[in-house]
Amino acid sequence: MRESVERELKLVPGEGFRLPELGTPLPARAFVSTYHDTPDLRLARHGVTFRHRLEKGTGLWQLKLPRGAARIELEKAGPPARPPSELVDLLAAHLRGTKLVRVARLRTRRQVMQAEGAEVVDDAVAVLDGQRVTARFRELEVELLDGDEETLRRLEQALRDAGAEPGHVKPKLYRVLDLTYPPEDAQLPDGALPADVLGAALGEQYHRLLAHDPGTRLGTDPEDLHQMRVATRRARAFLRAARPLLDQEWSEPLREELGWLGSALGDARDLDVLLEHVRGEVAELEDDREQLASLVSALEEEHERARAAVVEALDDDRYFALLDRLEHAEPKVASDDDSLGELWWKELKRTRKAFDKLGTKSSDEELHAARIKVKRARYAAELAAQELGKPGERFLSAAKKLQDVLGEHQDAAVAQKRIVAWAEAAPGRAEAAERMLEREGARREAAREDWPDAWKALAKRGREGKP
């Protein structure tokens, strides 16, 4: 299965536009693309496209998944009758047992020119219903191969000088089906009720879970697992922050299931962080690199087992049931005594009490517990963002900085424990381990020196945002 990251821009050819000579022309191409989706277009509505392309008798399945501003494209050769299981399996969270159907069929005649590490493409597209053409359109595309963003903008300007028109051009399928791209989040009106705010917040985290589920299954970018875990934690924290307002019979089972998913994702994510750090440290300790290679290998083996456990959890019916609940979440409110802003303020007061007990000699466990308090206050502020306004934004920025400092301390403490365990497992490792431990100790001490100032900044921002 081939994987690539798609970075492109699209333009509209103006009347009389002709593709200028920007580089080396390639042979013209013609192909038919058949798009597959659920009957309610669930894939397209989440920014995913899945199609079979037939060109010169050769079939190719292509799956495009959103990744930030770009898209990741996966390809697998195969006939049109049976989508490859390797690609369909990545869509399990989207499909949840729903069958794929054909939703559009397009014939494209393509002119291509290679220029400056990019391909400039001129597509003439016919929309097909059987053999009948129901619509036609034309679009220009510049896709980076090995060029940079400056190349992209330079070629865009050359096409505009030749008569191309700027403007947001949707991917072909979205144009044919008249869908918005990228999919838009629903906007809450000012003064929305807490239940509506919470419902929208849970919906956003549901969409983020779906967005990063395929990448987490694929396992080529650790950021997907990270973002999936963050979405899980956020949703759970939002329910916790709003707990005084909610019907516990509705909210607590959902919190419990989110806690299960967060735990299922946690070990693999923690090992992602630890492995990245340890690899960097080993690379700098050149004299000990050969001996420390066994530490990296041990962590990699553990990481593989943790990743397998993640994929197993994502194939569990319990996970799909959780997605169903989040998709249709309608919070049940039992009380309206407090606003979301007031709930945030109460959370911050609990955080302040925790930090009042801390000092320079506080244990690793106490600092870790304080970091959890900060995280809860941060997510409560996110939920109350509409009420808190600009002071809330400043609070969130300060909370993230303190979280990062305390997170660095926790990561160093965890790394130290793992290095000690590795050193004790076999003789002859003590000297190399000692140098690693010295570096982790310095990282811990730096965080211990930094957190009091970061807390003072957060406490100040909290006072400014008091409801």
Image (cartoon, rainbow, N blue to C red):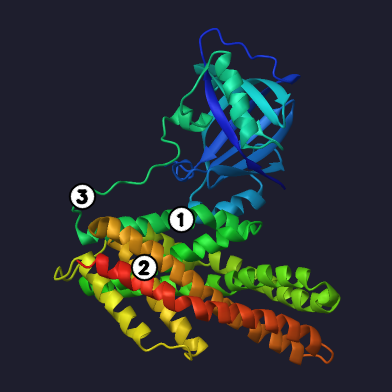
Secondary structure of residue under mark 2:
helix
Query: How much space separates mark 1 and mark 2, taking CA atoms?
Result: 19 Å
Binning the other alpha carbons within 10 Å of mark 2 as few (below 14), some (14 to 19) or many (20 upward) gives: many
Which image quadrant is residue 158 in? Answer: top right
Can you say whether 221 is above or below 235 in the image?
A: above
Please name the residue that numbered disc 2 is placed on.
378
Binning the other alpha carbons within 10 Å of mark 1 as few (below 14), some (14 to 19) or many (20 upward) gives: some
The residue at the point 54 percent across, 63 percent down is 226
Q: Which residue reaches farthest top?
A: 16
Q: Which of the two discs, 1 and 2, labels the residue nearer the N terminus? A: 1
Front disc: 2 or 3: 2
Q: Which mark is residue 190?
A: 3
Q: Which mark is residue 197?
A: none
The residue at the point 43 percent across, 66 percent down is 400
Query: How much space separates mark 2 and mark 3, taking CA atoms?
Result: 21 Å
Secondary structure of residue under mark 3:
loop
Residue 445 visible within the image: yes
Can you say whether 11 is above or below 117 in the image?
A: above
Can you say whether 282 is above or below 216 in the image?
A: below
Q: Is residue 9 left or right of residue 366?
A: right
Residue placed most toward the observer, 289 or 119: 289
Amino acid found under the numbered disc labelled 2: Arg
Residue placed most toward the observer, 213 or 229: 229
Q: Which mark is residue 208?
A: 1
Q: Pointers 2 and 3 in contact (CB under 8 A)? A: no
Q: Which of the two discs, 1 and 3, labels the residue nearer the N terminus? A: 3
The residue at the point 36 percent across, 68 percent down is 378
Count of number-bearing discs: 3
